[in-house]
Amino acid sequence: MAKNTGNTANVENVEVVVCKGHTVYHNGEKYGENQKLLLSQDDADSLEARGFVKTLADVLAVYERKQQELTQTDGGNNAG
């Protein structure tokens, strides 16, 4: 477990999303799949390496890429 040096000004927080089929417990709260939470960069990296979370930026990038593919596939005639 990381030591708390009392210097929290340099801690970068990252917004993450819990991956499908996983649950994350953080600061006494339970987060189920598709729920967002804010983690330190170290915690986010550790959980992402284990497949528990993805950064919100990564999730949004995948979503945008899929939306672009759909638009290109239907020629931009999206009825929705």
Image: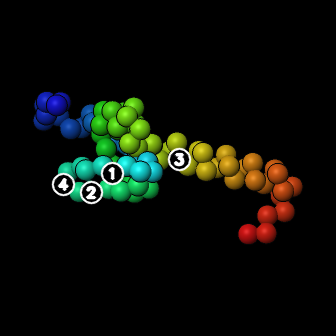
Which residue is identified by label 4? 28
Q: Which comes before the other along the chain, label 3 or label 4?
A: 4
Q: CA distance from mark 2 to mark 4?
A: 7 Å
Looking at the image, which residue is at 61% across and 50% down? 63
Instruction: Decide: few, some or many residues near mark 2? Use Cα within 10 Å; few <14, some 14-19, many ≥20.
Output: few
Q: Which comes before the other along the chain, label 1 or label 2?
A: 1
Q: Residue furthest bottom?
A: 80
Q: Which comes before the other along the chain, label 1 or label 3?
A: 1
Give the amino acid at mark 4: Gly
Foreground residue, 46 or 56?
A: 46
Q: CA distance from mark 4 to mark 1?
A: 13 Å
Q: Which mark is residue 59?
A: 3
Give the amino acid at mark 1: Thr
Q: Is residue 41 among what the camera can see?
A: no
Q: CA distance from mark 2 to mark 3?
A: 20 Å
User: Quarter holding the N terminus?
Assistant: top left
Q: Which comes before the other along the chain, label 4 or label 1?
A: 1
Give the amino acid at mark 2: Lys
For mark 2, give the secondary structure.
strand
Q: CA distance from mark 1 to mark 2?
A: 7 Å
For mark 3, give the secondary structure.
helix
Q: Quadrant of residue 61?
A: top right
x and y percentages locating residue 17 in the rendered image: 42, 50
x and y percentages locating residue 65 in the rendered image: 67, 46
Q: CA distance from mark 1 to mark 3?
A: 17 Å
Looking at the image, which residue is at 38% across and 42% down? 52
Which residue is identified by label 1? 23
Q: CA distance from mark 3 to mark 4?
A: 25 Å
Are circles 1 and 2 on residues that touch, CB within 8 Å?
yes
